[in-house]
Amino acid sequence: MNTRTLDAIFTPETLQQIFPKERTNDFFEALFGDADDGAYDIELAYGGVTGNNLTMELKLHERPGCCLACNLTQGLPQVFSRHPIINVKGIVAEVDKLLADNASCKEWSLGYTEQRQKDMHIIPINITLE
């Protein structure tokens, strides 16, 4: 599968349909009882493909006046992998639909939290394609 095809499939608009901005507030509402208590906003992004490994990213953007501390985000892959509002399994199912005849998603796992910038961390969704 070539990069141009994937770039055309995983547009910012399409990724926002899969993981709408409102889902962050829904997550914090369920977790804390108030969406305003969340320290970050979550965005789905396309991370790239290497061989038969596709990477999607859950980008955590620090909210103004909040702190995106490492101790807050390191345990999130385990939480996100099971949380019904984040719904990683559903994200992968939507990615599978978008790939259509080009490939299919065989299995997935969440990687470790990575700090890309002071105010932005990512959690990779590693997808094996077949």
Image: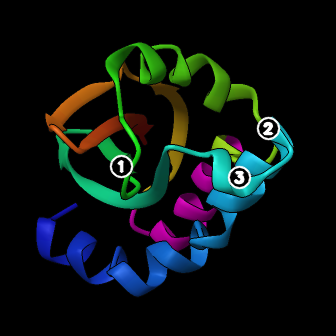
Which coloring applies here?
Answer: rainbow
Labels in figure, total: 3
x and y percentages locating residue 44 in the rendered image: 43, 59
Q: Main secondary structure of the magenta part?
A: helix
Circle 2 packing at 10 Å, graded few (<14), some (14-19), many (20+), is few
Label 1 near label 3: C-beta < 8 Å?
no
Regarding mark 2 in the picture, which secondary structure is present there?
Answer: helix
Mark sitting on residue 54 = none
Q: Which residue is mark 1?
A: 62
Q: Earlier in the sequence, mark 2 or mark 3?
A: 2
Q: CA distance from mark 2 to mark 3?
A: 23 Å
Q: Amino acid at mark 2?
A: Phe
Mark sitting on residue 90 = 3
Magenta highlight on residue 90: yes
Quadrant of the rendering where the C terminus is positioned: top left
Q: Read off the magenta span.
A: 89-102
Closer to the camera, 105 or 47? 47
**Which numbered mark, 2 or 3, is in the foreground of this view?**
2
Circle 3 packing at 10 Å, graded few (<14), some (14-19), many (20+), is some
x and y percentages locating residue 72 in the rendered image: 47, 21
